[in-house]
């Protein structure tokens, strides 16, 4: 079973739009475009419409400006981008395809960054690492709640000339116990 919301949000441009609205932000199309300057404005409008159609974002207000209406968008409060009920009914192949899309987008972002003549991973705080954790289900949930607090706080910070946009991606995969033959 495919989830329309998950399909919608896993598009690279729509994922960037969602990321700009994280942290209870309400932004106009113009403000979103200022944060996503690489996205043509007509393309941005199409992707905003798609995210609104599937219920990931909503129009929270409208501003009248010189005879036109400017919409203000925010993430839907009452729905998550992926309904956990649907997420739990997806097939292994569907999970793999969604994860592959996520991973490819991360690879693309990293490649775009590292190919710049000005990239400086140490200065820019680039990091990737893996740790094996031994946790009970309760300990795992506590860890996730502790991690989410500072991330949510940081996600609410507004861009300015001193702040650089940075992508934080997390992946949690249970380790498979391999039996010796």
Image: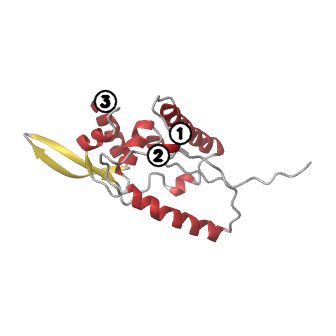
Please identify the residue farthest to the right as the structure is shown.
181
Residue 106 in the figure: left or right of residue 137 = left
Percent of width and height locating residue 9: 44, 43
Q: Is residue 85 left or right of residue 70?
A: right
How would you rate the neighbour count of disc 1 (Cα within 10 Å): few for under 14, some for 14-19, many for 20 or more?
A: some
- Cα separation between marks 1 and 3: 21 Å
Which residue, given by chain and number where applicable, does mark 2 sit on? 167
Quick one: SS at disc 1? helix
Assign a secondary structure to mark 3: loop
Residue 40, label in figure: 3
The residue closer to the viewer here, 14 or 31, is: 31
Residue 28 shows in the view: yes
Name the side, left or right, on which 132 lies relative to 111. right
Mark 2 or mark 3: whose residue is earlier in sequence: 3
Give neighbour class at mark 2: few <14, some 14-19, many 20+ (Cα, 10 Å): few
Which residue is nearer to you in this view: 100 or 30? 30
Mark 2–mark 3 distance (CA, rounded to whole Å): 21 Å
**Quarter location, residue 31:** top left
Which residue is identified by label 1? Answer: 106
In this picture, is 87 found above or below 94?
Answer: below
Q: Earlier in the sequence, mark 1 or mark 3?
A: 3
Q: Is residue 54 visible?
A: no
Residue at image x 59%, y 54%? 88
Percent coordinates x, y for residue 69 in the rendering: 15, 43
């Amino acid at each position: 079973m495919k989830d329309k919301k998950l399909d919608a949000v896993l598009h690279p441009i729509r994922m960037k739009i969602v990321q700009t609205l994280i942290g209870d932000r309400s932004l106009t199309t113009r403000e979103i475009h200022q944060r996503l300057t690489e996205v043509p404005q007509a393309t941005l409008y199409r992707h905003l419409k798609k995210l609104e159609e599937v219920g990931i974002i909503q129009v929270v207000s409208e501003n009248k400006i010189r005879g036109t209406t400017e919409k203000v968008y925010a993430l839907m409060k009452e729905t998550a981008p992926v309904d956990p009920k649907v997420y739990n009914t997806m097939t292994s192949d569907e999970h793999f395809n969604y994860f592959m899309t996520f991973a490819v987008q991360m690879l693309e972002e990293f490649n775009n960054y590292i190919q710049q003549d000005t990239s400086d991973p140490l200065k820019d705080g680039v990091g990737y690492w893996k740790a094996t954790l031994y946790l009970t289900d309760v300990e795992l949930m506590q860890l996730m709640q502790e991690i989410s607090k500072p991330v949510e706080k940081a996600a609410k910070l507004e861009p300015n000339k001193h702040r650089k946009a940075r992508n934080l991606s997390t992946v949690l995969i249970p380790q498979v116990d391999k039996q010796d033959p």
